Amino acid sequence: MVVPLSRGQRKRRLATDRIRRKQDLTSYIEKGILEKKKKKISSLKRLKDLELEIRNVELESNINNSTKLLKKSLTRRTREKEKKESLHQMKNILNYPKFISDPFETMKTHLINSIELERDRSNTINGENYNKRDRNTRNKVKKTIVKKSAKYT
């Protein structure tokens, strides 16, 4: 035998049901928001991972491209030309008076100058000395590079 609820009991039960439904709705919405945030964060993590992979691939491709350029087989004519040039350069080096007097010191100064030359070239490539307003300085740098390299040939 079921006893019917009084009017006050029914009102209280309806109020608690409304509160429970509101709480369920808010918890449902909060769960949805959290899931969206998690998806967004995970997608950002994936993007960062992809960015790192892309950078690695670019570095590898740059390395591969440079090695491909180095590995490219030379024709017989160019090999002969390079051989003649290197022999001529070697004769000039061996006949150079400073090299004859002190070969190690001469090689040391040559290496120091060539390292400075590489630094200058990398600076001009990176853009430190390479804008349109600095054409005069670029030309001066090129001339000094040519002058320095002409010393050893």
Image (cartoon, grey):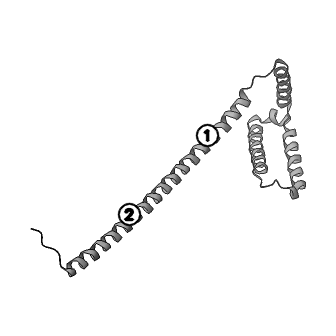
Above or below, comparing residue 126 to residue 146 in the picture: below
Q: Quadrant of residue 13?
A: bottom left
Q: In x, y percent, where is residue 145?
A: 84, 45
Task: Residue type at mark 2: give it.
Answer: Tyr
Q: In x, y percent, where is residue 4?
A: 16, 74
Residue on which the image places disc 1: 57
Q: Is 68 in front, or is 89? A: 68
Q: Is 132 in front, or is 138? A: 132
Residue on which the image places disc 2: 28
Q: Quadrant of residue 102?
A: top right
| Residue at (53% x, 54% y) in the render | 44
**Crowdedness near tag 1: few (<14), some (14–19) or many (≥20) residues, C-alpha within 10 Å:** few
| Residue at (39% x, 61% y) in the render | 31
Question: Along the horizontal axis of the image, is 35 left or right of 125?
Answer: left
Most distant residue in the left direction = 1
Give the secondary structure at mark 1. helix
Question: Along the horizontal axis of the image, is 106 left or right of 61?
Answer: right
Above or below, comparing residue 4 to residue 115 in the picture: below
Distance in Å between CA atoms under marks 1 and 2:
43 Å
